[in-house]
């Protein structure tokens, strides 16, 4: 098995035993998204960064499971705020179990993540550092989420820099924290922790930009979402910002007519997506993602081990993906 598959298998086993209890309905809700999908990308970062600095699977598995619980906690609450009906091809937690149960399920995942870290087989100082890292990340995620909500509520479009700040907090911080927690679990030096933090942060920004490209201009057969889904939903993501900056006249009107218009039909959305592609917005957004990927790559330039090569390969997969 590949390192990724091994790590995912280990984390899945840990999550199966950790997210269980009574009342059964609450834990079924908490485990729903975990059971039905997810690549386990963030836990893999924890485990691989630990391995880079001589850590063991046993030493990092608690932090890896905790970071996945936090990730799923954010998904459950995000779906409630956006009133999304599906995720990973199944009904969202609040649609399947009800909003009240979904809120509690998210809270259970959040709380159990901290309990999991505190059971790590590391010294007390390391446990404190792990808890602090995760707590700071959760605060950043909440700040990023409110920034996203504020951007959506305003008529004006954010600047490219404001968008990057938002996704840095909302998405990239959990990539950064995963890498940091892996390194901390292995007792890495401060300089090494700083390097993997930079890698994770820049990888996370590249990841979200690529995700937004796919959400706006991806192949509907691959994404399993309607063509131009993010455009119709009115998401002020970088590809849409760039497209509107690059178009004028009829081309701009074609895009704007579908932005935030949930009644826009497939034909209109197809024309809008074509206009976006013709504007060069996809290539421009991928170029921005590549710049952040290059920063991430530079952060690991001094490391030549197999785990470091694995991280760099994963980084390339992230920026190259089309679905």
Image (tube, rainbow, N blue to C red):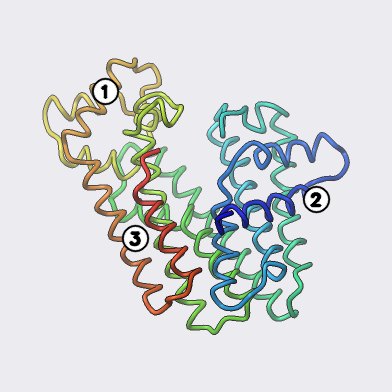
Q: Marks 1 and 3, how far apart in space?
A: 33 Å
User: Residue 142: horizontal and vertical position, in percent?
Assistant: 55, 53
Give the residue at mark 2.
17
Give the residue at mark 1.
257
Q: Residue at x 65, y 38 (%)?
A: 33
Q: Marks 1 and 2, how far apart in space?
A: 49 Å
Comes first in the chain, label 1 or label 2 = 2
Q: Residue at x 61, y 28 (%)?
A: 90
Circle 1 or circle 3, nearest the eye: 3
Circle 1 or circle 2, nearest the eye: 2
User: Residue 113: horizontal and vertical position, in percent?
Assistant: 71, 57
Please tell me how crowded label 1 is: few (under 14), some (14-19), or many (20+) other residues with Cα within 10 Å. some
Give the residue at mark 3.
293
- Location of residue 117 by image quarter: bottom right
**Which quarter of the image is occupied by the C terminus?**
top left
User: Residue 151: horizontal and vertical position, in percent?
Assistant: 39, 43
In the rendered view, tell whether residue 265 sits above or below residue 210.
Answer: above
Comes first in the chain, label 1 or label 3 = 1
Q: Secondary structure at mark 3?
A: helix
């Amino acid at each position: 098995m590949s390192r990724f598959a091994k790590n995912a298998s280990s984390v899945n086993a840990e999550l199966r035993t950790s997210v269980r209890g009574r009342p059964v309905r609450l834990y079924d809700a908490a485990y729903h998204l975990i059971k039905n999908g997810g690549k386990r990308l963030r836990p893999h970062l924890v485990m691989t960064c630990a391995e880079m600095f001589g850590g063991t699977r046993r030493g990092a598995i608690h932090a890896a499971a905790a970071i996945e619980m936090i990730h799923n906690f954010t998904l459950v609450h995000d779906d409630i705020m956006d009133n999304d009906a599906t995720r990973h091809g199944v009904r969202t937690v609040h649609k399947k179990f009800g909003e009240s149960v979904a809120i509690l399920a998210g809270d259970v995942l959040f709380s159990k993540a901290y309990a999991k870290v505190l059971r790590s087989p590391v010294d007390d100082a390391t446990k404190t550092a792990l808890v602090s890292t995760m707590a700071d990340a959760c605060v950043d995620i909440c700040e990023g989420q409110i920034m996203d909500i504020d951007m959506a509520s305003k008529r004006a479009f954010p600047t490219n820099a404001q968008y990057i700040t938002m996704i840095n907090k909302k998405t990239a911080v959990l990539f950064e924290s995963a890498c940091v927690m892996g390194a901390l679990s292995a007792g890495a030096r401060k300089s090494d922790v700083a390097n993997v933090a930079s890698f994770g942060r820049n990888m996370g920004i590249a990841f979200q930009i690529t995700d937004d490209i796919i959400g706006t201009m991806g192949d509907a057969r691959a994404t399993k979402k309607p063509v131009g889904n993010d455009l119709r939903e009115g998401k002020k993501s970088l590809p849409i910002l760039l497209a509107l900056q690059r178009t004028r006249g009829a081309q701009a009107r074609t895009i704007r007519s579908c932005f935030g218009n949930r009644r826009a039909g497939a034909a209109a959305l197809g024309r809008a997506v074509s206009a976006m592609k013709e504007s060069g917005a996809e290539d421009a957004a991928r170029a921005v993602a590549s710049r952040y990927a290059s920063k991430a790559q530079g952060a690991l330039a001094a490391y030549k081990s197999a785990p470091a090569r694995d991280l760099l390969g994963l980084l390339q997969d992230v920026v190259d993906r089309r679905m």
